[in-house]
Amino acid sequence: MKILKAFMKKLSTDNKINIIGHCLTLISLLLIFFTLVEMQTQRNAAYMPYIVAEFNDTVKMSWNGIDGLSFSNAPEYDNIHPPIYFDVYNIGDGIAKNVQFQWMDNNIVRLSEYINDNSTDFHVNLGGQMPRISAYGIEASGKVFERNLNYSFLSTGNYEPYKINVPYNYLLCYKFMQVASLDEYPEIHLKVSYEDIQGKAYEQILVINWNPGLYAYSNGHNGEDFSGYVDIGFTVN
């Protein structure tokens, strides 16, 4: 402090005025910088999309045999693309562009390993994304499904939701977990990637949990009367 006072005494009045002027200029530049940052933050928030999903349907999933599933809201033969879906909304302030929904690769691995580790009656042989579940000498095969679903854009404030189907293979695994009376049901993950109208990229991971409702099941000798049903429920975080 003494050194600074001594230095200031040696300066002329003009030098002191110049130093003060430079300091004021620096302060002004900093204020302008922080103002611009705040304006950009507010602008980004105004354009920011945000994707959510929810399960609002009431569907009974039933089966009569080791293989196959049917649903109360669809013809019995329509099992390739089961009508079990999430309603998807953009609740952000801006439009989402180049939207991609992707079921994560490790979903089917997690479900299959959980069955193998916790059930003595059922075993999953996993080839790629298609599980083959065997029990009582009979094998139930999964189906090939498209993991990626793309939309050019998702508008904000839309009252009609977009639809994302739950893959058949996941439902098949949950069926056998239900039949085996397992205590827990592993979560599955849906990745959502998109851009705002400025081109800024975003990514979300939607965590989906199976919450089964009413369940009934009967099983005869060697699985000959392997039948049952369960009310389907999901929650999305």
Image: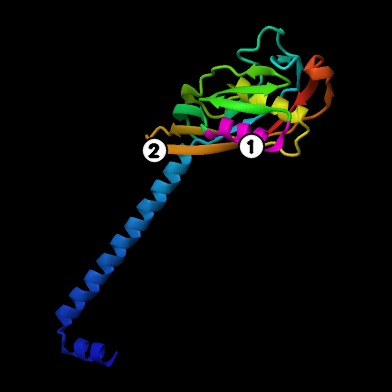
Do the numbered discs 2 and 1 sit on residues whose CB atoms are within 8 Å?
Answer: no
SS class of the residue under badge 1? loop
Determine the residue positioned at 78% across, 24% down: 231
Q: Is residue 2 above or below residue 188?
A: below
Point out the stretch of residues depicted in magenta: 106-120
Image position, residue 200 (x, y; %) = 39, 38
Q: Which of the numbered marks, if any, corresponds to residue 147?
A: none
Residue sitting nearer the eye, 100 or 96:
100
- For the C terminus, which image quadrant? top right
Q: Quadrant of residue 64?
A: top right
SS class of the residue under badge 2? loop
Location of mark 1 (residue)? 187
Image position, residue 15 (x, y; %) = 16, 79
- For the N terminus, which image quadrant? bottom left
Determine the residue positioned at 59% across, 35% down: 110
Residue sitting nearer the eye, 91 or 103:
103
Residue sitting nearer the eye, 138 or 211:
138
Name the kind of residue labelled 1 in the image.
Glu
Residue sitting nearer the eye, 193 or 190:
190
Q: Which of the numbered marks, if any, corresponds to residue 200?
A: 2
Q: Is residue 71 above or below residue 174?
A: above
Image position, residue 41 (x, y; %) = 42, 48
Give yes or no for residue 44 being in the magenta stretch. Answer: no
CA distance for labels 2 and 1: 29 Å
Task: Tell me: 99 left or right of 21.
Answer: right
From the image, give the main secondary structure of the stretch colored magenta: helix
Does residue 168 appear in the picture of this structure? yes
Image position, residue 66 (x, y; %) = 72, 17
Q: Quadrant of residue 145?
A: top right
Give yes or no for residue 107 being in the magenta stretch. Answer: yes
Determine the residue positioned at 16% across, 89% down: 10
